[in-house]
Amino acid sequence: MGYSMSIEIIVVMGMDEESESALHNCWKAAEILLKDYGLEAYVVPVNMWIHDPIRLSELKLPKVIIEGRLIAEGKAPSVEEVIDAIIAFQLFTLADVMTIPNGTFRKSQIPEAILF
């Protein structure tokens, strides 16, 4: 693809297996992106140091944020989901795509009257 910019993957996590799985899957995706696509991705773990399963559920941890866009919340995304999201972000410019609350893509702006 020939891009020289690096991609930031933030994993906001608790002290649970699902968060560890999210971190591991993001690391694996970063390895594949570099090897197969020549894209540099840096995984930044942000630990909330929460053990309580109820509190983890309330905060919907883990959260995976790629280039400022939330791609997963409350569950670990698969390696393929992380790679697909990053490739989709690389294919479109910010002028072409807007992320809407449910995580889908739309090529035109949402009318302001719809936004709360």
Image (cartoon, grey):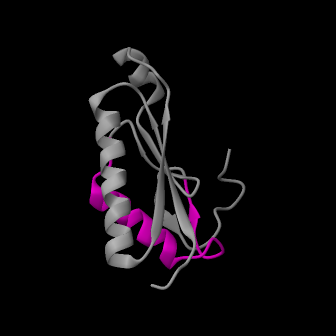
The x and y percentages for residue 99 are 55, 60
Asked if residue 16 lies left or right of residue 73, the reply is left
Question: Residue at left 35%, top 35%?
Answer: 19
Residue 4, percent from left and from top: 55, 77
Rendered position, 58 above or below 4: above
Where is the C terminus found, in terms of image quarters? Answer: top right
For the N terminus, the image quarter is: bottom left
In the depicted view, which residue is nearer to us: 84 or 109? 84
| Residue 65 on image: x %, y % | 50, 49
Q: Above or below — where is 92 with respect to 68?
A: below
Residue at figure coordinates x 49%, y 65% from the top left: 105
- Determine whether 18 is above or below 67 in the image: above
Residue at 53% across / 50% down in the picture?
Answer: 101
Residue 93 colored magenta?
yes
- Look at the image and give the residue range highlighted in magenta: 76-100
Residue depicted at x 46% and y 22%: 49
Picture quadrant where residue 50 is located: top left
Q: Nearer the viewer, residue 107 or 81?
A: 81
